[in-house]
Each structure stands twice: as structure tokens, then as C-alpha cells.
Amino acid sequence: MYSKPLKFAVLIDLFFVQAAYQLTTGGKFQDAVQKLHAILLNVALLVVDSKQEISETQQLLGICREYIVGLQMEVKRKELPKVRQTVFYRRANATNSFQRTVVHGTFQ
């Protein structure tokens, strides 16, 4: 009757997370946001067995949230006229709230 809750290893499957990263590096920001949002939604079904898994899940949630915000900012920036894009980009880089991984250190 009830479906089994997801085990920690299923959610953290590298294929799913790496797919979001590949979409990001490929410039497909909307698709990456959808993939990261799906990860956030699946956490509600997650079962963890240790404090380490709790910590890793919390870290994953933080990464997903930061990427979603950053990618949505980039999508909005691209919609702006060219002059305003530069100002937007400088302000986005001035904030410390968005911590990108080294691979995604710059926007294209």
C-alpha cells in the first residue's frame, strides 16, 4: 500500500546531482533549476540512519538552495539590457551569500 521511503544513497546518487551540475555548466539554467528543485522535493521522502547522513543532507539542501537562487539571478540578468547586466553582475559578485563551487565560479 505505502511506497518505501527513499534511502539516503538513492537521493545522493551522483548521476542525479551531476546532471544538475552538467546542465549548469552547459548554460541550461532553467533545466538545472528544475533538477535542483526536484532534489529539494525528494528530501521530504528521505530516510536517514546516521548523523553523518543528516549532515550531508543538510549540506545538499544548502547547495541546492544557493544554486537555485544563483541560477535564477543569472536568468533574470540575461533578460536585462546589456548596460544593466554589468551592474547586476557586479552586485551579485559583491555578495557573500551565494557560494558557488570552484567549477561554477563564473557565469557565462
Image (cartoon, grey):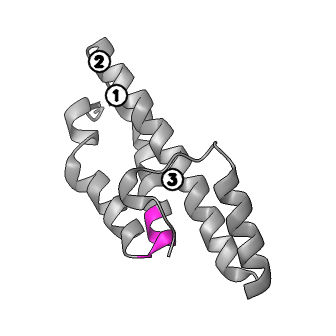
Label 2 – label 3 distance at C-alpha: 22 Å
The extreme top residue here reads 51
Q: Mark 3: which secondary structure? A: helix
| Dominant secondary structure (helix, strand or loop) of the stretch shown in magenta | helix
Q: Position of residue 86 (x, y in %)?
A: 72, 75
**Magenta span has 30?**
yes
- In front of the other: 64 or 102: 102
The residue to which callout 1 is attached is: 56
Asked if residue 51 shows in the view, the reply is yes
Residue depicted at x 70% and y 81%:
79
Q: Residues within 10 Å of mark 3 (few under 14, many from 20)?
A: many
Asked if residue 48 shows in the view, the reply is no
**Among numbered discs 1 and 3, the one appearing first in the sequence:** 1
Residue depicted at x 28% and y 33%:
1
Q: Amino acid at mark 1?
A: Glu
**Among numbered discs 2 and 3, the one appearing first in the sequence:** 2
Residue 67 is tagged as 3
